[in-house]
Image (spheres, rainbow, N blue to C red):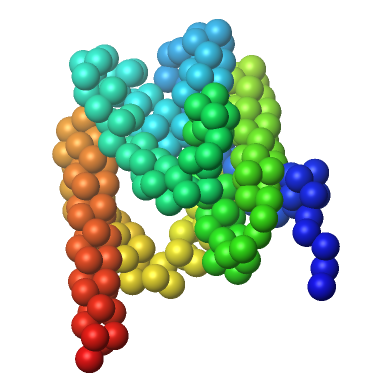
């Protein structure tokens, strides 16, 4: 019987298992840094935005609205809707972190990211009794934050010299696709992705990027409906 991992070992395991996704995270961070400056933000504003918000998808969604002088409520509402998935992440991880102090939960909440959430779900799926969940999560989340911020700051300070034809958007998109595809093995996730994708394409012409908001709501609704029906079917089969 192998010995239980120490907190240090779990932390570095989290770092190691996050790093394969590092190039994709780096590409998106660099794209976001460049986009913030190209959209008209000063270097100081973009740096503060990156460090405080730490939410690439919300930043990229909000930037065109900021550049187009959209109303503040539209910018805030767009960022809120894009980041609603973090509510799902928080609900999923609540059981692992509810014993921590409010300060430590706030730190982990700030560090939450898509890549680390996928890695954490994989850990709980493959090792449901893993004893050092918090250090593992903290290690991976911290690594994700460092990679993102380094890339974002490079993009911010190098926006004038980084060519726009490097195809960094494609690299970041491919990295996100690699994360999403394994999640689609479950019916609710597959339903949500399929519906959100279809709605996003169909509604891409709506002003103020409202098509994105519509796609998020439609995807969430489809996933919740699929989860409800799938759960009811499971309960029905177990009762029979």
The x, y position of residue 80, in whole percent, is 31, 31
x%, y% of residue 224?
24, 59
Q: Is residue 86 above or below residue 58?
A: below
Report the number of numbered marks.
0
Where does residue 16 sit, x and y in percent of width and height? 75, 51
Q: Where is 189 relative to 219, above or below?
A: below
Question: Which residue is at 83% across, 62% downward?
Answer: 3
In what quadrant of the picture does the C terminus appear?
bottom left
Q: Nearer the viewer, residue 117 or 74?
A: 117
Image quarter in which the N terminus is found? bottom right
Q: Quadrant of residue 135?
A: top right
Q: Residue at x 60, y 69 (%)?
A: 126
Pick whichever, 115 or 35, lies toward us: 115
Question: Is residue 32 in view from this perspective?
Answer: no
Question: What is the x, y in percent for residue 81?
Answer: 28, 36
**54 on left or right of 123:** left
**Does residue 132 appear to the left or right of 66 in the view shown?**
right
Q: Residue at x 57, y 47 (%)?
A: 116
Q: Is residue 153 above or below residue 143?
A: above
**Residue farthest to the bottom?**
240
Compared with residue 157, is residue 135 higher up or lower down, i.e. above or below?
below
- The residue positioned 43% from the left and 72% from the top of the image is 185
Can residue 78 be seen here?
yes
């Amino acid at each position: 019987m192998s010995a239980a991992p120490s907190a240090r070992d779990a932390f570095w395991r989290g770092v190691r298992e996050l790093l394969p996704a590092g190039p994709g995270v780096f590409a998106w961070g660099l794209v976001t840094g460049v986009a913030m400056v190209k959209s008209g933000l000063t270097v100081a504003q973009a740096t503060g935005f990156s460090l405080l918000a730490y939410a690439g998808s919300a930043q990229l969604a909000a930037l065109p609205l900021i550049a187009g002088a959209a109303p503040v409520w539209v910018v805030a509402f767009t960022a809120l809707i894009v980041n609603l998935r973090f509510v799902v992440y928080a609900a999923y991880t609540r059981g692992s972190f509810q014993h921590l102090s409010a300060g430590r939960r706030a730190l982990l909440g700030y560090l939450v990211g898509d890549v680390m959430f996928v890695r954490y779900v994989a850990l709980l799926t493959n090792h449901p009794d893993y004893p050092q969940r918090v250090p593992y999560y903290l290690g991976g989340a911290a690594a994700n934050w460092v990679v993102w911020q380094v890339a974002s700051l490079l993009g911010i300070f190098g926006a004038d010299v980084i060519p726009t034809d490097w195809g960094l958007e494609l690299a970041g998109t491919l990295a996100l696709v690699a994360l999403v595809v394994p999640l689609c093995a479950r019916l609710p996730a597959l339903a949500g992705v399929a519906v959100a994708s279809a709605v996003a394409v169909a509604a891409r012409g709506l002003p103020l990027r409202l098509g994105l908001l519509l796609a998020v709501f439609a995807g969430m609704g489809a996933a919740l409906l699929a989860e409800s029906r799938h759960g009811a079917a499971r309960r029905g089969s177990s009762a029979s």
